[in-house]
Amino acid sequence: MPRQRQAPPAGGPRQDYLDAFDGDEDVFAPRSHGAAHPAAAASPASSAAQVSPGAAPAAPAASPDGRRDGGDGGARAAGAPAPGRGSKGRTFTGIAAAAVTTVLAVIVAGQVADDRSGAHAQTATDQARDARAADGAKGADTGALPSAQAAPKLTYAQKMSTVYAMSPTFKGSGRFETVPGSAKAPGTGRKYTYRVDVELGLGLDGQLFADAVQKTLNDDRSWAHDGARTFERVSTGTPDFVITLASPGTTAAWCAKSGLDTTEDNVSCDSAATPRVMINAYRWAQGSKTYGDRIYAYRQMLINHEVGHRLGHNHVLCQKDGALAPVMQQQTKFLDHDGIHCLPNPWPYPES
């Protein structure tokens, strides 16, 4: 009479899985001393040999007589008794138990391997993120701003309305650099060519200065009024004059070549004995008390006043109280004179 099947141990295979075998013995029933213990087939060494990538296969275990196991039932645990001559059903059942346990070990080991792979991928992601963060920190150390936080680009008008740092006693290198590029004369009148030089080491925007000269001189309120003249910026060849942005010390040195003293009021000049119209960088950067915070208009006046000298115009004074000061008045020094109050004005033809 068949023996009643015992319930599998807790955590063992499901009953429907056990029923798939035809053996008349319970897979988890106690074994006689002649049967291989199923735990031998599921030893950690065996499982690891089957799932470790790149590992060499484990050598078959040696039998007591020195011969290697043929591998029919898997490697046998050290010290386990040799299989007995039990029934075929018992042998098949032992093999089945070993197979079940081995399959479970492979599945579990595969899941562990997958988990490790996922952990490795996450670690790589973390490392990439950390590298980006490190690069950002380096940028912060050097004063660089990430693109999302970069300061907005200023317009021409905003730059022209900004006061820049400059010492009134600064004397630069005395060496000049030409602002590269050119700007075509927009009008049809008498054409004047000029070059823009900037003293090295000023720390000011040379391109802004060059743009300001071109825009100011070709404005209809300026010397280009009614198409009488037009101005073209060049960076090669021999121009009609050179407009030069220089430190107070260098400006004074070049103005002295034409017998002019700019040191008393720290002003600009047209050094008529040389090709240079000198614009004092301190005044360009800081303005004057007479114009207050109207730095944009003051810079236009500087250009028009000094180029006016180059074109042959001399100093004149405001003649009516409350009137606009002529552009050829020394507006950096004063607006009022002889009881007459004059208003700041950067243009030769302001009513245009």
Image (cartoon, rainbow, N blue to C red):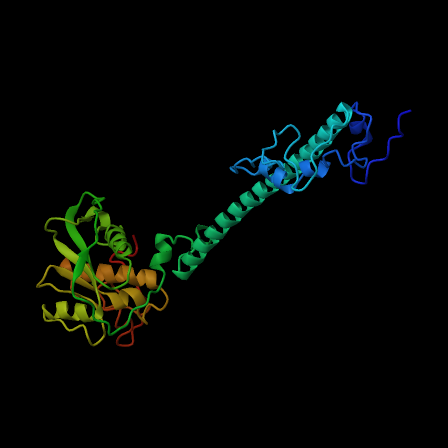
Task: Give 344 or 34, whichever is nearer the viewer.
Answer: 34
Q: Nearer the viewer, residue 308 or 58?
A: 58
Q: Quadrant of residue 89?
A: top right
Q: Position of residue 44 (x, y in %)?
A: 64, 42
Residue drawn 16% across the image and 52% down it: 194
Q: Residue at x 24, y 74 (%)?
A: 169
Residue 2: x %, y % from top left: 89, 25
Question: Is 118 on the left or on the right of 283, as rendered?
Answer: right
- Residue at image point 33% right, 63% down: 295
Nearer to us in this view, 205 or 121: 121
On screen, residue 246 above or below 340: above
Image position of 304 with respect to 290: above or below? above
Q: Can see residue 198?
A: yes
Counting every numbered tag in the picture gives: 0
* Residue 323 visible in image: no
Residue that sits furthest to the front in the current view: 65
User: Is residue 58 rendered to the left or right of residue 158?
Assistant: right
- Asked where in the image residue 143 lies, by quadrant, the reply is bottom left
Q: Is residue 50 above or below residue 343?
A: above
Quadrant of the rendering where the N terminus is positioned: top right
- Report x, y in % for residue 170: 24, 72
User: For this view, does 23 lie left or right of residue 317?
Assistant: right
The quadrant holding residue 253 is bottom left
Q: Depth check: give the residue in front, 191 or 131.
A: 131
Residue lying at the far right of the rendered structure: 1
The spot of residue 47 in percent (x, y) is: 63, 38
